[in-house]
Image (cartoon, rainbow, N blue to C red):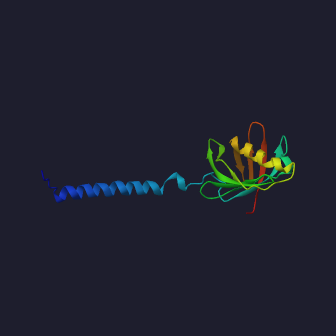
């Protein structure tokens, strides 16, 4: 059986498809993906000024930089690590961090494990001007903003 479609019904369907596409496109323009991954931190770098109650193995310091598209890089004194970070519920949730593979002498060789374990705990974060405070139930790190 052969069916025919009137030009009006084709036009109505086309108009509906265009309207749905336009609405979807508009939704993409205001998507939260364009917002800061970590509000107030994107494009900023920090270096630790204190770590309590125990210091970073090898003395640190912890250096952390927040880039575009959720990117984060950090070092605690040995290897450079990178991944992503997202803010949820006042905490920083880090992805699994990739790392360079330098062999650092003791005790600095333990700094990477310290940084990785700290990041895995999804520390609470607070920003007050140039000061970033990261805290877990066992460790508090105070960092000061530096130039990139």
In the displayed structure, 139 sits above or below 85; it is: above
Q: Residue 103: which quarter of the image?
A: bottom right
Q: Residue 120: which quarter of the image?
A: top right
Instruction: Measuring from the top left, give residue 3's x and y in whole percent.
Output: 14, 53
Total marks shown come to 0
Which residue lies at the image location 36% right of the left edge and 56% below the top edge? 21
Instruction: Measuring from the top left, give residue 85's x and y in whole percent.
Output: 64, 50
Outermost bottom residue: 148
Which residue lies at the image location 18% right of the left edge and 58% below the top edge? 8
Instruction: Measuring from the top left, give residue 124's x and y in whole percent.
Output: 69, 42
In the displayed structure, 90 sits above or below 35; it is: above
Outermost top residue: 137
Quarter of the picture containing the C terminus is bottom right
Instruction: Name the foreground residue: 118 vs 131.
Output: 118
Q: Is residue 82 left or right of residue 141?
A: left
Which residue lies at the image location 86% right of the left edge and 52% below the top edge? 105
Instruction: Measuring from the top left, give residue 28's x and y in whole percent.
Output: 46, 55
Q: Is residue 14 left or right of residue 100?
A: left
Q: Residue 71: which quarter of the image?
A: bottom right
């Amino acid at each position: 059986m052969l069916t025919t479609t009137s030009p009006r019904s084709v036009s109505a369907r086309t108009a509906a498809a265009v309207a749905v596409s336009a609405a979807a496109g508009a939704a993409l323009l205001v998507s939260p993906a364009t917002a800061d991954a970590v509000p107030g931190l994107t494009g900023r770098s920090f270096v630790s000024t204190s770590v309590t109650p125990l210091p970073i193995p090898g003395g640190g310091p912890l250096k952390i930089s927040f880039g575009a598209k959720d990117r984060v890089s950090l070092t605690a004194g040995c290897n450079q690590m990178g991944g992503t970070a997202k803010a949820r519920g006042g905490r920083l949730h880090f992805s699994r961090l990739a790392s360079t593979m330098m062999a650092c002498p003791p005790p600095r060789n333990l700094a990477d494990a310290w940084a990785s374990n700290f990041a895995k705990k999804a520390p609470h974060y607070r920003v007050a001007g140039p000061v970033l405070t990261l805290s877990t139930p066992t460790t508090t790190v105070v960092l000061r903003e530096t130039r990139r």
